[in-house]
Image: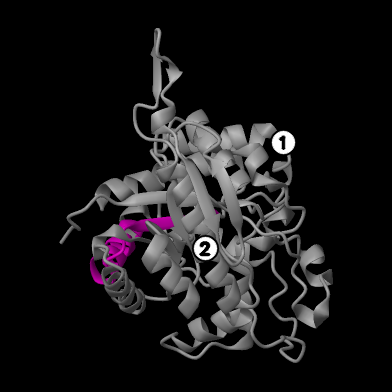
Amino acid sequence: MAPKKQIHINFFEVTCIGNHIAVGLWKNEVDNSRTKDTVDYYMWIAKLADQGKISCIFVADSYGGRETYQGKADAAYRSGGSVGQTDPTIWVSAMAAVSKNPFILARRWSTLDHATQGRLAWNVVTSYSNASAKAMEAHEYMDLCYSLWEGSWEDGAQTWKKPEGAYDPNKIHKIFSSGKHHKTTAYGATHPSPQRTPVIFQDGGSPQGKMFAAKHAEAIFCGGRSPEDIAVLVKEMRGMAEAQGRLGSDLNFFPSMTPIVGRTVEEARAKYDKYKTMYPLDEPLDYNEIKEGVVIEDVGTNVKKDPEPLTPRQLGERMAFCGGGNMPIGTPDMIADVMEEWINVGDIDGFNVASCNPSPARAWNYVERLCRARRNV
């Protein structure tokens, strides 16, 4: 039975020069991910999303390098995975960025929300380490941003009337905040943007991340190897939101998916087999240099949930190719069947879709077929 709600498909991007999911695709002669340091690339992907009726472009961002393996970044640089990262706020307005000062960030997001006519979303992520302390600071940070966005300016503060004046000072209020981590005494720097507060995204599966999402998030980027697996998380998170006085339906869930789409099953399988040749799958895996308490623990958790035990070759193939996300292979109708199962069983709201199609022409064919699958759902 088809799901009785509107489904959203988002593009999943990172502004690294190369690829963040299908890491080795820079070896493909038609790959265009090396042009991510140009305006043309982002204009192209924005037009592609618009033509394909994609809900949003979700852009992940980070400041730290990948130094978990052997305590150095050599492997990341050789593979070209998530390196050469530029500042996403320069390329596209609805991007995740970090500012130590809530006042500066609140003004930045208000400005971008004005510039995009209310199309801004913010993916809020704290650092990988010291999660408990960072979560406490993040709550305080968000509360201060809310005060600046929602509490400083009343509706109708802009009057533009003679002789009263351009603004009504009785409707503009100074915010006083004295927290453990941030202290501010200021008026909101700019008048309310179309949304006032941008859409809040969150992607974190730790206990602290779940609590943060239950209180603040409208959309959650989440993992999961099966619809049944993710249904447990969705149910838990909706309950946590209700405990915060919100509706469970206030949360929207977007697992990662990397579909390999072809006009026929044979074409889709041939694409998959070609992509696999671009990775050194038979090099041995060495876990001795991996530190505890880092993101690799999430990988182990997901691996344990697989219905069949994974060999080192299979694990390496999965993590090099598409991370922990689901990768259905087939025609648009087959992809639609997979999506429908996830939606019905997992109670999710859409997908963050990463592409393994490296050239502009192939990408449009991919989006066209993906949209056909969505219409079928």
Give the amino acid type for the residue marked by disc 1 in the picture: Thr
Tag on residue 144?
A: none
Drawn side of residue 14 relative to residue 351, left or right: right
Residue 8 position in % (x across, y down):
35, 50
Q: Report the residue marked by disc 1.
A: 38
Q: Is residue 304 above or below residue 318?
A: below
Q: Is residue 185 magenta?
A: no
Q: Secondary structure at mark 1?
A: loop
Residue shown at 61%/59% (left/top)?
182
Residue 315: name its quadrant: bottom right
Q: Secondary structure at mark 2?
A: helix
Q: Is residue 341 magenta?
A: yes
Q: Is residue 304 above or below residue 167?
A: below
Drawn side of residue 52 relative to residue 131, left or right: left
Residue shown at 40%/46% (left/top)?
369
Residue 131 position in % (x across, y down):
58, 76
Q: Residues within 10 Å of mark 2 (few under 14, many from 20)?
A: some
Residue 178: name its quadrant: bottom right
Give the amino acid type for the residue marked by disc 2 in the picture: Glu
Residue 228: name its quadrant: bottom left
Q: Report the residue marked by disc 2.
A: 140
Q: Is residue 57 visible?
A: no
Which is in the foreground here, disc 1 or disc 2? 2
Q: For the N terminus, which image quadrant?
A: bottom left
**Magenta-highlighted residues:** 335-355
Residue nearest the viewer, comparing 180 with 247: 180
